[in-house]
Image (cartoon, rainbow, N blue to C red):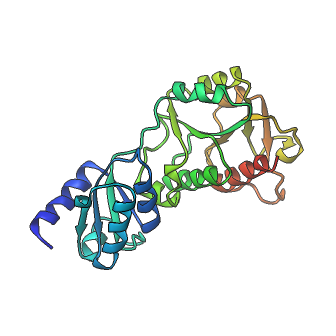
Amino acid sequence: MSNKTKKNVSSSKNNSLLIYGKHPVEAAMRNKHRLISQVFACSENVEFVKKLLSDNHRTSTLLNIVQRKEIDKLLPPDAVHQGVIAFSQPLDWGAFEDFYEILAQKESAKVLVLDQVTDPQNIGAIIRSCAAFNADALIVQDKNSPQETAAMIKASAGTIELVPVLRVVNLTRALEQLQKIDFWVLGMDGKAQMTLDKIKKPSKVALVMGSEGSGMRRLVQEACDEIVKLPINPLVESLNVSTAAAIALYEFSRE
């Protein structure tokens, strides 16, 4: 590997977001809004990356051929990169206020809202469920939610390219705004009396999930129209937030 390529790896790592694995890199390539600065591939993946670049109208000069050990150095030991990584700028889906206008015009919609969920892998898995069950957006509070990371992208299996992730300053105010355009705000809490499967499903719903440690904050919970729980075995205290989100989204996708 040339010194020039080594320099590219180093500079990309310092200034960009890392995406690793064939599927996440392929999904990133397909997203015309994703700004990709460099792609690094082992020799056995060169043709795969060349085809991706060609099919998605991206310049072939993005490709750098490297040895697997050079990629290994950039990632945790257990990271499954499959010999392909890319460097990109984080996605910017725009302001909540802009997307709010789109939601206002919909007759039916569902969004998922996360209150202080901080694990990037959990958020990545939640994004994957949002994509699988056709959620219109994921809303998080800017201050208490991690920025887009390599682990989040990998956990989403590339679906982070499909789901608008909207960051807001004040989560309670965002819920109040959604209520003004006919969203029914449902907070998920294991201590609730009503179970999710028993309620009448509204045409526009915002599902609010709290953190695993402390759940929803008081003001967020007070902003909800109703508090519900999943109908799980009472001997089981709770589910992982990403699992709970998937079940809740599936319940609404059935209607």
Residue displayed at 23% across by 52% down = 14
Residue displayed at 26% across by 61% down = 60
Residue projecting furthest to the left: 3
Q: Position of residue 168 (x, y in %)?
A: 51, 30
Q: Position of residue 178 (x, y in %)?
A: 66, 26
Residue 150 sits in which quadrant?
A: bottom left
Compared with 101, 34 (above or below) is below
Q: Nearer the viewer, residue 191 or 92?
A: 92
Residue projecting furthest to the bottom: 44
The reply to whether residue 119 is visible in this rendering is no
Q: Is residue 42 left or right of residue 179?
A: left
Compared with 110, 79 (above or below) is below
Residue 235 sits in which quadrant?
A: bottom right
Q: Nearer the viewer, residue 76 or 58?
A: 58
Residue displayed at 28% across by 66% down = 40
Q: Is residue 98 left or right of residue 179?
A: left
Q: Is residue 67 left or right of residue 141?
A: left
Residue projecting furthest to the top: 180
Q: Nearer the viewer, residue 46 or 72?
A: 46
Residue 219 sits in which quadrant?
A: top right
Q: Position of residue 89 (x, y in %)?
A: 33, 46
Compared with 163, 235 (above or below) is below
Q: Position of residue 3 (x, y in %)?
A: 10, 67
Q: How many marks?
A: 0
